[in-house]
Image (cartoon, helix red, strand yellow):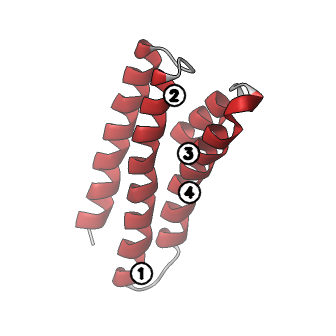
């Protein structure tokens, strides 16, 4: 959840002319914890895995968006590297959830 909040706060600071990038990043970020929560509430293993995979896909979607933000100088290199590292850590956690089922 912290990663999603961090990305939402970051995206909210973008100038209005980058509203499409802002909305895309916020949408992908919010999808991560929401799909984990929805998957956790499902009874069948297949449904759980499906929602966890959707969450992971949203997480992967954040990477190219952040790369675009870096190229457009909406974020700096240090910020990008920190977010990329968090993204990879979260990806490992989601993969662990999937493998545990």
Name the residue furthest left.
Answer: 99
User: For this view, does 39 lie left or right of residue 95?
Assistant: right
Q: Nearer the viewer, residue 82 or 28?
A: 28
Residue 31, which numbered label?
4
Of helix, strand and loop, which one carries label 3? loop
Q: Which image quarter: residue 95? A: bottom left
Find numbered disc 2 in the image and state the secondary structure of the residue it sits on.
helix
Observer-side mark, 1 or 4, equals 4
- If you read the primary sequence from the N terminus, does the residue marked by circle 2 or circle 1 appear first? 1
Disc number for residue 69: 2
Residue 5 percent across, percent down from the top left: 62, 38
Q: Which residue appears at 34% of the width and 30% of the height?
A: 85
Who's the residue at 71% across and 38% down the image?
Answer: 19
Residue 1 has which mark? 3
On screen, residue 3 above or below 81: below
Q: Residue furthest bottom?
A: 44
Labels 1 and 4: the sequence-earlier one: 4
* Residue under the point 38% across and 49% down: 60
Whether pointer 3 and pointer 4 mark residues with C-beta atoms closer than 8 Å, the reply is no
- Judged by depth in the image, the label closer to the viewer, 3 or 4, is 4
């Amino acid at each position: 959840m912290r990663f999603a909040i961090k990305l939402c706060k970051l995206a909210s600071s973008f100038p209005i002319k980058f509203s499409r990038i802002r909305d895309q990043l916020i949408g992908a970020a919010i999808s991560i914890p929401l799909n984990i929560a929805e998957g956790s509430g499902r009874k069948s293993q297949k449904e759980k895995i499906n929602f966890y995979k959707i969450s992971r896909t949203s997480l992967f979607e954040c990477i190219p968006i952040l790369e675009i933000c870096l190229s457009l100088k909406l974020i700096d290199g240090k910020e990008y590297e920190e977010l990329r590292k968090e993204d990879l850590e979260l990806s490992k956690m989601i993969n662990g959830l999937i493998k545990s089922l």
